[in-house]
Amino acid sequence: MLMTQTKSEKTTGKKIQLEVLNGCGTKGVAILFTNFLRSNGYDVINFKNAENFNFNKTKIIIHKHDAKNFANEIIDILALDSKQIEYNFDKNIFYEMTLIIGSDYKKLNSFSEVAMHYNPF
């Protein structure tokens, strides 16, 4: 089975690696977005709970300088507001970005498509 290639992978030959964090406390939301992103060709290397569940808005944190160019790709696929990007450059983090799912996740324009990636098992 061939993996889906993202726009950035076609350009750079490298998959975007990211971490998905549940920042709202709804059980299963991190795996739901992980399944969606993986099915669209992204390399989700980790998913878990955020340090707290007080995130009202879903946001992306960019860790690598060269990943700034690919943030718009994730914003487009998830239909996020570009104001929800933060930069926390850290050479000790090996993946490009972190997606934190906030309590607004059901209001995202992409949620109807994301919801189809529910895995009951």
Image (cartoon, rainbow, N blue to C red):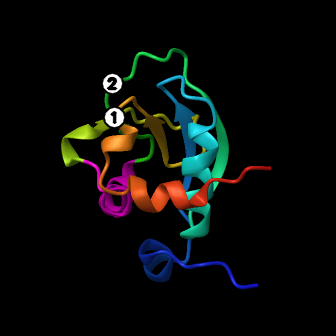
Residue numbers of the magenta segment: 65-80
Give the answer, above or below, for where 52 lies relative to 82: above
In which image quadrant can residue 26 be found? top right
Disc 1 crowd rating (10 Å Cα; few below 14, some 14-19, many 20+) is few
Q: For the point 45% across and 62% down, which residue is it?
A: 113
**Closer to the camera in the image, 96 or 84:** 84
Image location of residue 95, percent across then percent down: 57, 47
Cβ atoms at labels 2 and 1 below 8 Å apart? yes
Q: Where does residue 40 sit, x and y in percent of width and height?
A: 54, 69
Find numbered disc 2 in the image and state the secondary structure of the residue it sits on.
loop
Residue at the spot of label 2:
56
Q: In which quarter of the image is residue 73?
A: bottom left
Residue 86 x, y percent position in the rendering: 30, 35
> What is the residue that sits farthest to the right in this orientation?
121
Q: Closest to the observer: 96 or 85?
A: 85
- Most frequent secondary structure within the magenta stretch: helix
36 versus 8 height, above or below: above
Residue nearest the observer in this picture, 91 or 43: 43
Looking at numbered disc 1 in the image, what kind of residue is underneath it?
A: Asp
Is 89 on the left-hand or right-hand side of 96?
left
Answer few, some or many: residues within 10 Å of disc 2's Cα (few below 14, many 20 plus, some between 14 and 19).
Answer: few
Q: Which mark is residue 104?
A: 1
Mark toward the start of the polypeptide (2 vs 1): 2
Q: Distance between the residues labelled 2 and 1?
A: 6 Å
Callout 1: SS: loop
Specify the amino acid type for callout 2.
Asn
Relative vertical location of residue 83 with respect to residue 75 in this rendering, above or below: above
- Which quadrant does the N terminus fall into? bottom right
